[in-house]
Image: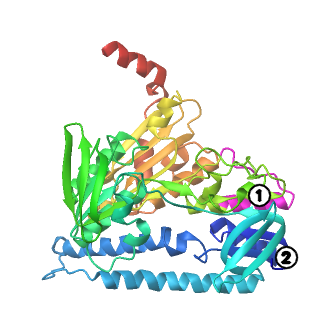
């Protein structure tokens, strides 16, 4: 017998960044609001992704600084790692985040329901609760904030080997003896470096010819140099063909590179090769919501799905996979529900990879400018020219900016260096205001700060006559060949 249906003004599936903010806002506006969350109160960011990973990464940085103590005149006989203590610090932070979220739900009046939702009609879901009972919920307006999960490639023996994803890696209470990391993207490089600093031997397997393949070659080369200094082994152009054994107990990996096939022995395996949307198996076929060939929900620039009265937000809607983008998805939907006219079109999306040193970018990379045939001027300085680094001994990396040859606006900024993410935000503010780069070049910035390096960077912008025109560059390259 089906449970009685409960009607809500607003029904949200998933309590991630966009979903929870929308729930709190709508409930405070006297809309009867329900949020169905499968497991993670607040979504993946405060529980298993953004904040937990940066928490653990910072513990690894402290370990590295301790090893460098003599460089700063601080003598330490030895450094040892207590992974149970690392995990306990991370768990304490997560517990605090969950308590805060529960308080915010209570204050807003939104009802948080823990259970598995499955559509049984266009705007109606059946929810299996943790106690085994069910509830049927319907919403006048429905919002999907389903998120994604780590992909496990279809490689013989891989799933049977029970490899770690970022979720399990952040719950380790031991230091892996030899960790193999499959993938070279954001998650892979962050966790590979952290585990190396905790004491693991680390090998990265990357199918492409560089780490973080979407970034400029000079960015990837700088991170590779750092990884080599850290003692991380990186194997490029390498495919995983098969796995035997059990991660955590010992595994054998069969790989193929440009020289042929061979085997690797390791203790643990971490898979970080991409994400899959959580859209399968929730009954979307009972609605008119369309998904693309990869399972992401099709939305327009206002995040409306193909079904009337149903929206999708965050990663499941194909938005860039960053919490700050999900926050903006919430703003777009919420403002439009209240008569606004916001869209995803033309968003300036920054990102930061929390390796040490950090990688941060906003706007165009050089590779993107060349692919899109956009003329630009480029300024680039080593981090050693930023005077703050002389005080911290954090001189690795560089700052780079692309400037329009037409109006002096900043087309893009890339930083590889300590606090690169913070420095990037200053550049983004100028880009959003459509101001010329000269505003930063002539600014009086506090000394000695990392952001002060922007005056040095933008003083290095070449004359407009030195602009790079991608079409011409390609022609010269072909002629030289």
In the rendered image, residue 51, in percent from the top left (x then y), is placed at 48, 72
> Residue lying furthest front in this view?
1
Foreground of the two, 21 or 237: 237
Indicate whether residue 2 is drawn in magenta.
no
Query: How much space separates mark 2 and mark 1, taking CA atoms?
Result: 17 Å
Residue drawn where x is 42% and y is 22% of the image: 473
Above or below for 59 versus 357:
below
- Residue 75 occupies which quadrant of the picture? bottom left
Indicate whether residue 341 is drawn in magenta.
yes
| Mark drawn on residue 478 | none
Side of 405 where 114 appears, left or right: right
Q: Quarter of the image containing the C terminus?
A: top left
In the rendered image, residue 107, in percent from the top left (x then y), is placed at 74, 86
Residue drawn where x is 52% and y is 85% of the image: 95
| Mark drawn on residue 5 | 2
In the rendered image, residue 192, in percent from the top left (x then y), is placed at 31, 62
Mark 2 neighbour class, 10 Å CA radius: few under 14, some 14 to 19, many 20 or more: few
Foreground of the two, 67 or 188: 188
Q: Secondary structure at mark 2?
A: strand
Q: Quarter of the image containing the N terminus?
A: bottom right
Residue drawn where x is 40% and y is 57% of the image: 272
| Residues rendered magenta in the picture | 328-346
Residue tagged 1: 286
Mark 1 neighbour class, 10 Å CA radius: few under 14, some 14 to 19, many 20 or more: some
Residue drawn where x is 85% and y is 76% of the image: 5
Q: Secondary structure at mark 1?
A: helix
Q: Is residue 459 visible?
A: yes
Side of 392 where 464 appears, left or right: right
In the rendered image, residue 309, in percent from the top left (x then y), is placed at 83, 58
Side of 310 where 390 appears, left or right: left
């Amino acid at each position: 017998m089906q449970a009685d249906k409960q009607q809500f003004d607003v029904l949200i599936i998933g309590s991630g960044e966009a979903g929870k903010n929308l729930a709190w806002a709508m409930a405070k506006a006297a809309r009867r609001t329900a949020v169905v969350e499968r497991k993670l109160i607040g979504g993946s960011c405060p529980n298993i992704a953004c904040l937990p990973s940066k928490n653990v990464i910072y513990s690894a940085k402290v370990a590295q600084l301790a090893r460098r103590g003599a460089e700063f005149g601080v003598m330490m006989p030895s450094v040892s790692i207590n992974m149970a203590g690392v995990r306990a610090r991370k768990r304490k932070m997560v517990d605090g985040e969950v308590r805060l979220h529960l308080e915010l739900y209570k204050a807003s009046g939104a009802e948080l329901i823990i259970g598995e939702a499955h559509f049984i009609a266009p705007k109606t879901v059946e929810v299996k609760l943790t106690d085994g009972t069910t509830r049927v919920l319907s919403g006048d307006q429905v919002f999907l904030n389903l998120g994604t999960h780590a992909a496990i490639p279809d490689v013989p023996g891989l799933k049977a080997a029970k490899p770690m994803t970022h979720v399990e890696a952040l719950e380790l209470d031991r230091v892996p003896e030899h960790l193999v990391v499959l993938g070279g993207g954001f998650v892979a490089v962050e966790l590979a470096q952290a585990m190396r600093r905790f004491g693991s031997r680390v090998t990265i397997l990357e199918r492409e010819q560089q780490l973080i393949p979407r970034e400029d070659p000079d960015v990837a080369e700088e991170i590779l140099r750092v990884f080599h200094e850290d003692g991380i082994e990186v194997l490029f152009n390498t495919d995983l063909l098969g796995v035997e054994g059990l991660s955590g107990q010992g595994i054998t990996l069969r790989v193929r590179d440009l020289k042929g096939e061979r085997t690797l022995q390791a203790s643990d395996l971490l898979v970080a090769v991409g994400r899959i949307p959580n859209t399968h198996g929730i009954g979307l076929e009972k609605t008119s919501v369309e998904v693309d060939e990869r399972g992401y929900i099709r939305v327009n620039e206002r995040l409306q799905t193909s079904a009337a009265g149903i929206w999708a937000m965050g990663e499941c809607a194909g938005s860039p996979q960053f919490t700050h983008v999900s926050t903006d998805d919430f703003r777009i939907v919420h403002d439009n529900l209240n008569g606004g006219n916001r869209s995803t079109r033309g968003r300036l999306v920054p990102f930061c990879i929390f390796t040490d040193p950090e990688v941060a970018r906003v706007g165009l990379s050089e590779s993107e400018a060349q692919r899109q045939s956009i003329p630009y001027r480029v300024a680039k300085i080593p981090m050693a020219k930023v005077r703050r680094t002389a005080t911290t001994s954090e001189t690795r990396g560089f700052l780079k900016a692309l400037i329009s040859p037409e109006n002096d606006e900043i087309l893009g900024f890339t930083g590889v260096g300590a606090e690169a993410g913070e420095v990037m935000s200053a550049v983004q503010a100028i880009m959003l205001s459509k101001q010329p780069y000269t505003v930063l070049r002539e600014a009086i910035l506090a000394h000695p700060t990392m952001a002060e390096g922007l005056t040095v960077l933008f003083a290095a912008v070449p004359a407009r006559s030195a602009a790079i025109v991608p079409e011409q560059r390609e022609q010269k390259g072909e002629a030289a060949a």
